[in-house]
């Protein structure tokens, strides 16, 4: 299950909200939420964060290769 499927599952099972109710709560259109849940369309990082915030989540970017991620994390811990 991708992030989009997890968003739908959390919205339904944890919050018990319909798409329209959740869209109203986070201030986006139902269509935008539907597109995000269905991995369609092109939503900005700001919109993703608005949608994810009530679930305690936030959008971001991670390197596609695990080695690159470990190098970044290692560099950050070496600086501290």
Image: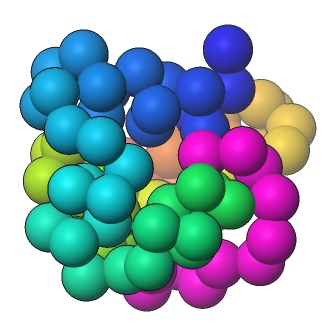
Is 44 inside the magenta-drawn segment?
A: yes
Along the line of sight, the residue nearer the viewer: 67 or 33: 33
Does residue 53 belong to the magenta stretch? no
Left or right, residue 55 beside residue 70:
left
Up-down: is 71 above or below 6?
below
Report which quarter residue 51 is drawn in: bottom left
Principal secondary structure, stretch drawn in magenta: loop
Residue sitting farthest toward the right:
65
Residue at 41 percent of width and 21 percent of height: 9
* Residue at figure coordinates x 72%, y 45% from the top left: 38
At which x and y percent is residue 80?
A: 24, 58
**Is residue 63 something that shows in the picture?**
no
Please name whichever residue, 70 or 78, is drawn nearer the observer in this view of the structure: 70
Residue ID at (16%, 27%): 16
Nearer the observer, 44 or 69: 44
Quarter assignment of residue 4: top right
Residue 41: horizontal and vertical position, in percent? 80, 71
Instruction: Give the total of numbered labels.
Output: 0
Q: Is residue 69 left or right of residue 22?
A: right
Image quarter of residue 26 = bottom left
Residue drawn at (50%, 45%) of the image: 73
Compared across the picture, whether 67 is left or right of 43 comes to right
How are the residues colored? Answer: rainbow
Q: Position of residue 47 (x, y in %)?
A: 45, 80
Front position in the image: 47 or 37: 37
Q: Quadrant of the N terminus?
A: top right
Answer whether residue 52 is visible to the viewer in this image. yes
Q: Which residues are magenta?
A: 37-47
- Give residue 75's position: percent from left, percent from top: 53, 54
């Amino acid at each position: 299950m991708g992030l989009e499927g997890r968003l739908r599952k959390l919205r339904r099972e944890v919050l018990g909200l319909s798409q329209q109710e959740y869209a109203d709560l986070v201030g986006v259109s139902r269509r935008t939420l539907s597109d995000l849940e269905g991995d369609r369309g092109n939503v900005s990082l700001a919109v993703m964060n608005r949608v994810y915030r009530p679930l305690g989540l936030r959008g971001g970017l991670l390197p596609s290769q695990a080695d690159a991620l470990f190098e970044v994390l290692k560099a950050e811990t070496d600086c501290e």
